[in-house]
Image (tube, grey):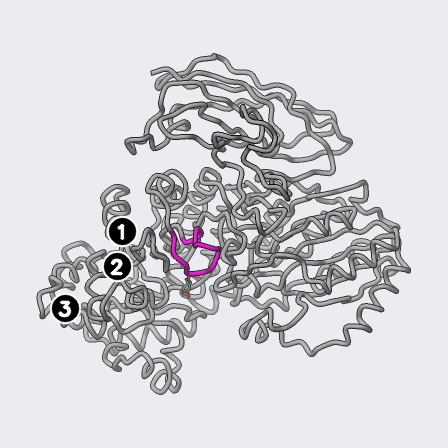
Amino acid sequence: MNKDQLTDLLHQMTLTEKIDQLVMLDNSFFQKDAAITGPQVKLGISEDVIRNIGSAYNVIGADKVRKLQDEHMKNSRLHIPLLFCGDVIYGLKTVMPIPLGYSCSWDPETIEKGMSIVADEASASGIHTVFSPMLDLSRDPRWGRVMEGLGEDPYLASQIAASEIKGLQGNLDSHHVASCIKHFAAYGAAEGGRDYNSVDMSERKLRQEYLKPYQSAVQAGAKMVMPSFNTINGIPSTANKWLLKKVLEEEWGFHGVKVSDYAAIQELVYHGYAEDAYDAAEKAIHCGVNFDMKTSVYANYLQKDVEDGRVKEEEIDEAVMQILNIKNELGLFEDPYRQASVKEETARQYTEESRRTVKKLADESVVLLENHDVLPLNKNQKIALIGPMADSKGTLGMWAFNTDASRNRTLREELTERVGQENVKYAWGCDFVDSMDALGDIGKFFHPEAPRNLIEEKQKALEAADASDVIVFTMGEHAMQSGEASSRTDLSLPSCQMSLLHEFKKMRKPVVVLIYSGRPLLLQEAADNSDALLQVYWPGSEGASAVADVLTGKINPSGKLTMSMPRSMGQIPVYYSQLKTGRPLQGSGHTGKFVSKYLDCPNSPLYCFGYGLSYTDFTISQLSLDNPYMNKTEPLHAVIHIKNIGNCKGDTIVQLYIHDEAGTIARPVKELIDFKSITLEAGEEKDITFGISEEKLRYYDANMDYITEPGKFMLYAGLNSEECIETEFTYQL
Ligand code: GLC
């Protein structure tokens, strides 16, 4: 359709039809028998509303979508097609590592490819928009949703965010989908790491750090935005005019569609920000929130708001037109199915090429934290493979609920294939959790396995270990202990796992620990009682193959942490880009005691941002600048010399950080401004050049101007955020 036709369509709509177009309901409303008695009644909306709604989400499957689209267009007076959305965050059928995992690849190009697979598989099944990518920066591993995000750093997350949008949207042909970035904004800074909790931070910290990845995604062309559940400085994002109108629309030029999060408009009342649903409807529409997800607030109150003069019909028209625009951009008026079909699903889902892509990402997402000369395993070692993940296909994380996990292979199968049946002794050994209560209701639902005899299982594990040369032990948390509504106050490994690890330690055999988790856990005790330690997160459909390849040396691990790993709960939040304080641990004028530190724990994390080992070794021997001065028009060039001093080929990620020595606002000790991945043969050395433009130095100064102030800057180059070589330069106006 062209603009005039869309405008004409809008003018044909009654006010009621316009308001119904702003309603988004999930799949539970479309299972005929259930809908009438179940959610529809509960929500208090009429059949008429359902007949005219604008969007449905989590209806998965081309046949279901086509049937529902046909029915909807037949029953609605103006035959406006539904927009089908879905929670496809990191994979519908072929599943990537969780985003916190794949962010450790520092590989935007392959992530883009991975997201194009997400789009291809989702669109084949009739999904038009995915509620992805999640771009919430977080430095608090108590918050379970860190698994959906890209870690703690604004620059890295912004680079990856742009690639995720490109991968999902492409040119919006029928193999791509609209993205809906979430959760806008700063949801990852929830107080206490408790999900849905309030967020309080300065506008400067918001703009300088937390808003950056969303801004990058909008600049990359994101079509939709989902405001977050939380308040920011007392105002819920869902009705935050400063955030949704001033920043998102006026400053960033976003004029796409905003989808409330699940029942978030109604929650304005719970927040105490709206008197009632009538008030909530008004507050949300004034912020241009187009879709009311899964409540009847718009459907049942907006019309009265208009009749009472609290909302102008023009506001409704604008919200509806933005929805008609995205439907038109997606070609729904010409092809309401966007070529989705069972045939397309068969052709485009679970393909070998997709598996290869997610395998590459999984290879690059494994982070080697410790290796005391035990990895890679050698061919004729007898391996005891122990633990709840060792023979499980559930390596996918909380949001991968549309795939057939039975298609995946387990680590036991993959390892056996590589080293031979005779060299692998498997035992379950222990569970993920000390008690099922840790999983809450939904977790128990996903963990239906019959209880085992834990004493017998432990004994079998000890016998397997006793009869082997090396022990590979899968530890961590259950997949349902991270993700939404999964905040935790104690990130220690469960005692059932630790007691087994201590038994293994007594055997004086090499112990390799694999950590499966959706977040950083407390790994000090596991590190102290093992000889190699790998963080694998939830590595996706090809995770078992990737882990087996890393263990046997076919893949040399190159992953680098994107979220600091704390030594203790008391350190949280711990992240690399903190301010120096007036009493820094090193270099302050005060005696040892009176500096910014803890009495009972070092300041540094156990493993820092950017950290990850390899089976080889690299050194960065020099960092030189082509000029000690720079200005707005003349960028600097930094040359770094790196050498592979180990005995095998390897990949690593060279990281470049700055510190602004003095500003009108105190500046972090380091800020990532660039990174490059490099592959070197054993003994090979190379120079890498980075361009440093003035834009990379900018920050929000005391007047909230986004500028670069004159003065001295430190420049750091390293293979993680702690061990760097440094030089300095001066920025001149
Ligand atoms: C959930 C999540 C959001 C998701 C939405 C729809 O509560 O916050 O990430 O896309 O509801 O399921």
Query: Tag 1's secondary structure?
Result: helix
Residue, far right: 467
Residue type at mark 2 is: Val
> Is residue 370 located in the magenta-colored stretch of the structure?
no
Return the residue at label 2.
289
Q: Is mark 1 within 8 Å of ligand 1?
A: no
The residue nearer to you, when weighing 79 against 596, is 596
Quadrant of the image containing the C terminus? top left
Quick check: can you spot residue 570? yes
Q: Which residues fall within the magenta stretch?
A: 187-199
- Where is residue 2, by image quadrant? bottom left
> Which residue corresponds to the image point at 67% horizontal and 76% vertical from the top-left?
449
Q: CA distance from mark 3 to mark 2?
A: 15 Å
Please report contact status of discs 2 and 1: CB closer than 8 Å, yes or no.
yes
The residue nearer to you, when weighing 152 against 357, is 152
Query: Tag 2's secondary structure?
Result: loop
| As drawn, 157 above or below 671 | below
Query: Of discs 3 and 2, which sits in the foreground?
Result: 3
Return the residue at label 3.
305
